[in-house]
Image (cartoon, helix red, strand yellow):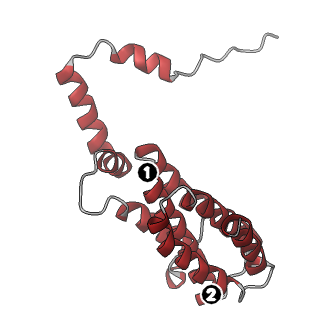
Amino acid sequence: MKKPTKAPQPTWANVKAKLTSFDRVGLLGLIQDLYASHKDNQTFLHARFGLGEDILKPYKEKLDRWLWPDVLRDQDTSALKAKQAISSYKKAVGDPAGLAELMVFYCECAAGFCNDVGYQDDAYFDALVRMFEQALKIIAQLSASGRRSLIARLDKVRTVSHNFGYGVGDDMDSLIAKYLEQ
């Protein structure tokens, strides 16, 4: 018996080939339809074009939702969905200062939630420590004046993280020594 063959999945190359047939009005119409179809598309375009007073706000709202959920509403945590918010910002803008702010905010939310409700989850702690390290790496790319307040905020996260056990605070101590005391 012969195994049925799958039709190839469309790729960016296929979409790009179709786009070449669009004129300016058609392309604007397509972008308008994408904008109207999903809030994430709106957030992306607002960030890409620097529209609005605070382009980080929708990304921070997602971080807050997934890292500091409302336990009374039985909401769950998701480090993966929180990281996706940062990834989405990076694709839209990729500004190192904005990325550093989101990464530090991630650490603040995650550590704050754990400290506030006594949340203990190995995978969540691992994700927090990895984001702490990524934040330190990106902060190192900023000017000295841009670094100060972010490092001070991470230092508060590190201090709070000593309350968790599991070596979270110790791991952060090592990372601070590695990236800031070089």
Q: Quadrant of residue 113?
A: bottom right
Would you place residue 164 above or below residue 174 in this image?
A: below
Q: Quadrant of residue 37?
A: top left
Q: Residue at x 67, y 63 (%)?
A: 133
Badge nearest the viewer, 2 or 1? 1
Would you place residue 108 above or below residue 38 in this image?
A: below
Circle 2 — which element? Answer: helix
Q: Quadrant of residue 53?
A: bottom left
Asked whether 163 or 78 is in front, the reply is: 163
The answer to whether residue 75 shows anywhere in this view is no
Type of amino acid under label 1: Asp
The mark that comes first in sequence, 2 or 1, is 1
Type of amino acid under label 2: Asn
Task: Specify the label residue 95 is tagged with.
Answer: 1
Image quarter where the C terminus lies is bottom right
Q: Is residue 77 left or right of residue 123?
A: left
The answer to whether residue 151 shows anywhere in this view is yes
Q: Is residue 133 left or right of residue 39?
A: right
Q: Residue at x 33, y 50 (%)?
A: 47
| Position in image of residue 169 (x %, y %) | 73, 80
| Position in image of residue 102 (x %, y %) | 48, 63
| Position in image of residue 83 (x %, y %) | 57, 58
Q: Residues within 10 Å of mark 1 (few under 14, many from 20)?
A: few
Q: Residue at x 68, y 64 (%)?
A: 179
Task: Specify the label residue 8 is tagged with.
Answer: none
Circle 1 — which element? Answer: loop
Residue under numbered circle 2: 115
